[in-house]
Amino acid sequence: GYALSGHAHPISHVAFSPDENWLLTADRVSTGDDSTGQSVITLWNLSAKDPTRANIKLSQNQLNGMSQTAAAFSPDNRLLAVGSKKATETGEAAAVYLLGISASGVSYDQPVEIVVDPAGGEVSALAFGKRGDAWWLAAGMKNGKVALVNVSSGVSDFKVIQLAHGIATMNVLTFSPD
């Protein structure tokens, strides 16, 4: 086995890609952390002879300053969704960034940004699901809202629903297979 190391902060997310070629590990700088460190997403290439030497690190600077709060691979292995909160003129907004995935790695030059709750909040859970021919992304937020985004239609088709008032942080989301 291999010891996968290199994060400066506690790991907050771990996920395998559906084809099992990539392992995502992400750390998160806590709000109480007085260091100048940045959150980092690391993609470990598990099909490489030595995954500890074949990894891709994505820092906040590389990802337009976003601080990741959740991450998920699409079931067709084409997208990596990263949940975030972003600074705005009026405070913070909940956002999701979509990054393309290929056999050689992740394209982070032009991430697609979707502001799923401009009134604030933070994405705390992500899940992909298929409905008919369309791929959907569900983004759960700490304020109890869920955004459903049709990622097959160029991400312009989405709606935010409030599941219940006073609900605690949305930690896990999944789609029913039917």
Image (tube, rainbow, N blue to C red):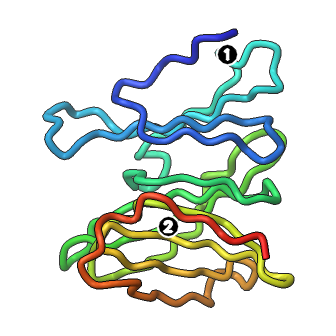
The kind of residue on which mark 1 rests is: Arg
Q: Position of residue 5 (x, y in %)?
A: 51, 17
Quarter occupied by residue 89: bottom left
Q: Can the viewer see residue 66?
A: yes
Quarter occupied by residue 149: bottom right
Q: Position of residue 62 (x, y in %)?
A: 49, 46
Q: Decide if residue 45 is on the left or right side of residue 155.
A: right
Residue at horizontal 67%, vertical 53%?
A: 73
Residue wearing tag 2: 96
Circle 2 Cα neighbour tier, 10 Å, few/some/many (<14 / 14–19 / ≥20): many
Q: Nearer the viewer, residue 171 or 106?
A: 171
Residue at horizontal 45%, vertical 69%?
A: 140
Residue wearing tag 1: 53
Q: CA distance from mark 1 to mark 2?
A: 29 Å
Image vertical order of residue 33 relative to residue 83, above or below = above
Residue at horizontal 29%, vertical 67%?
A: 168
Q: Position of residue 118 (x, y in %)?
A: 33, 82
Q: Decide if residue 104 is on the left or right side of residue 83.
A: right
SS type, badge 1: loop
Quarter of the image with the C terminus is bottom right
The kind of residue on which mark 2 rests is: Val
Q: How many marks?
A: 2
Q: Nearer the viewer, residue 45 or 60?
A: 45
Residue at horizontal 40%, vertical 55%?
A: 66
SS type, badge 2: strand
Q: Are marks 1 and 2 in contact (CB under 8 Å)?
A: no
Q: Position of residue 56 (x, y in %)?
A: 62, 32
Circle 1 Cα neighbour tier, 10 Å, few/some/many (<14 / 14–19 / ≥20): few
Quarter occupied by residue 85: bottom left
Residue 98, disc: none
Mark found first going from the N terminus, 1 or 2: 1
Q: Decide if residue 131 is on the left or right side of residue 88.
A: right
